[in-house]
Image (cartoon, helix red, strand yellow):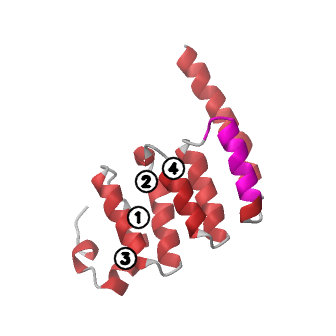
Amino acid sequence: MATRIGAFKIRELENFFVPILQNCKNIVELKSIHARVIKYSLSQSNFLVTKMVDVCDKSEDLGYASLLFNQVKEPNGTIVSWTAMISGYTRFGSYADALDVFRQMQIVGVEPDEISIISVLPACAQLGALEVGKMDT
């Protein structure tokens, strides 16, 4: 019963941060929000980290996105966070980083889905990584 209440409270707090993150305009604001996320012990929330990575992508700060993503101890909770990183790296031409994240995702046991595969294909094309581009899932 206590676990259920705890999970409900966590989801409630996560939902509290969603509109704040959606209205976030820049990395300075994001860092302030991130500090509050840490204060509420939500820094391991794959859900919130993915939302923060999306803000970084829009702000063109993949360095901070990478920092957020790498601080999650168990990023295999959701393919969405992995795909967000792959997409961000691909979008900004960091093709080797996109492939590295894609390979790391598979190493930890997260199976690629259609969206993650579509996100990594431009990196495969740019780097001539035919073995990744042809892989079966």
> Residue 30 magenta-drawn?
yes
Q: Which residue is mark 3?
A: 121
> Residue 131 magenta-drawn?
no
Q: Earlier in the sequence, mark 2 or mark 1?
A: 2
Circle on res. 116? 1
Q: Is residue 14 above or below residue 91?
A: above
SS at mark 4 in the image: helix
Q: Nearer the viewer, mark 1 or mark 4?
A: 4
Q: Is residue 45 visible?
A: yes
Quarter of the picture holding the N terminus: top right
Our reading of the magenta stretch's main secondary structure is helix
Q: What residue appears at the point 58 percent right and 27 percent down from the top-left corner?
A: 7
- The magenta segment is 29-42
Q: Earlier in the sequence, mark 4 or mark 2?
A: 4
Q: Which residue is mark 4?
A: 71
**Disc 4 crowd, CA 10 A, few/some/many (<14, 14-19, 20+):** few
Q: Is residue 22 visible?
A: no
SS at mark 1 in the image: helix
Question: Disc 2 marks which amino acid?
Answer: Ile
Q: Is residue 98 above or below residue 81?
A: below
* Tag 3 and tag 2, C-beta contact below 8 Å: no
> How many angstroms separate mark 2 from mark 1 (CA)?
8 Å
Q: Nearer the viewer, mark 4 or mark 3?
A: 4
Q: Which residue is mark 2?
A: 79
Q: Earlier in the sequence, mark 1 or mark 3?
A: 1
* Tag 2 and tag 1, C-beta contact below 8 Å: yes
Question: Disc 1 marks which amino acid?
Answer: Ser
Q: Earlier in the sequence, mark 1 or mark 4?
A: 4
